Image (cartoon, coloured by chain):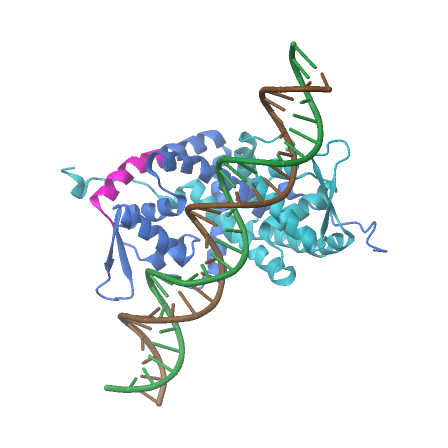
Chain colours: A cyan, B blue, C green, D brown
Amino acid sequence: MSETKDAPLPAFDLDRFTPYRLAVAAQRTSEELARQYRDRFGITIPQWRVLVHLAQSGDVSVREIEARVAMDKSKVSRAASRLEAAGYIAKTVNDVDRRLVRLILTPRGRALMAELLPLAAAYQREIEARLGAAFAGLEAGLQSLLGEAAKEGLAQES
Amino acid sequence: MSETKDAPLPAFDLDRFTPYRLAVAAQRTSEELARQYRDRFGITIPQWRVLVHLAQSGDVSVREIEARVAMDKSKVSRAASRLEAAGYIAKTVNDVDRRLVRLILTPRGRALMAELLPLAAAYQREIEARLGAAFAGLEAGLQSLLGEAAKEGLAQES
DNA sequence: AAAGATTCGTTGTAATCGCAACGAAGTCAA
DNA sequence: TTGACTTCGTTGCGATTACAACGAATCTTT
């Protein structure tokens, strides 16, 4: 506590700190798209994630979504409740295991996704075009980063 | 409910959707580190970001942090208030422009950062080691992504 | 110089989040 | 079967957040 005045802090470059850069990149890219479907359809990001999972898998339980996406149980549950209230999805009890809730898109939900998915696909293409050759590198990096931490159904080809 | 029954939704692979992957990667890496300094020093992520900016720049206004990190004004402001209450930073009024608040590390804050920064640096090295050759690609991708986004989203630059 | 517009940081408020506790359903073992 | 343990999804609660509104300071325009 004597030499704190000019104690030399370890050199640290925030602009090269990967978690920080990932956070900024994630927030910018997510919000840019989120704004579109929020303004046009009143959908939040958690709700969008649930919807996409349903569009992909057709029939998913809360816990499956929780495990796959980095979302808390309650977050998934509440997003699902709001989607149900809005008429986009339906909740059914799984006959085999009645603890599980089967989430499925309603026709209205399918119609919504028929509008949302092209939006997302276009945005993805925009990103890839923006990055050009750097995109493949980003993908590989994310693959390596995400692969390390718990993932079961991760395809790794091409 | 007539034609939507078997309406083929556009194919869409969430696992290859860049904003989503960035969000998951960012959340995992940030939390992994945050747990360390939360348990040991009671620092939250927003607080940590403010601290790092101060450690780097020595003298920063709220709006500078807001512009650089993707953090809301109020988030920065409240994080700074808590850091001030904890004695880690001090708030002064900028003499030249008295709307601006100068944030600076106190000696106690410098001592804290002397402990935190090596932690972060070690984590960064861990990530680089984990990724190996893929790290350079990730970096390049993020560079390209953040460079473009800055141009597009932030009209102002110094 | 004064009125109007703009910027900075704080604060009020409603909504959201994460965490933990809980009831319901299922599993296991004796 | 019964009782202890586990899992799934919801909900209560305190804390946090985003967004807007605001006062103070500065800039601009006349």
Q: Residue drawn at (64%, 43%), measured in percent from left and top?
A: B14
Which quarter of the picture shows residue A19? top left
Check the picture and name the quadrant holding the N terminus of chain B: bottom right
In this picture, which residue range is highlighted in magenta?
B105-120
Q: Report x, y in % for residue A60.
A: 70, 39
Q: Residue drawn at (40%, 41%), measured in percent from left and top?
A: A17
Q: Is residue A21 above or below residue B118?
A: below
Is residue B118 covered in magenta? yes
Q: Report x, y in % for residue A50.
A: 65, 46
Q: Is residue D4 left or right of residue A94?
A: left
Q: Report x, y in % for residue A72.
A: 56, 40
The answer to whether residue B145 is seen in the rendering is no
Check the picture and name the quadrant holding the C terminus of chain B: bottom left
Is residue B3 covered in magenta? no
Q: Nearer the viewer, residue B31 or B147?
A: B31
Q: Report x, y in % for residue A3.
A: 15, 38
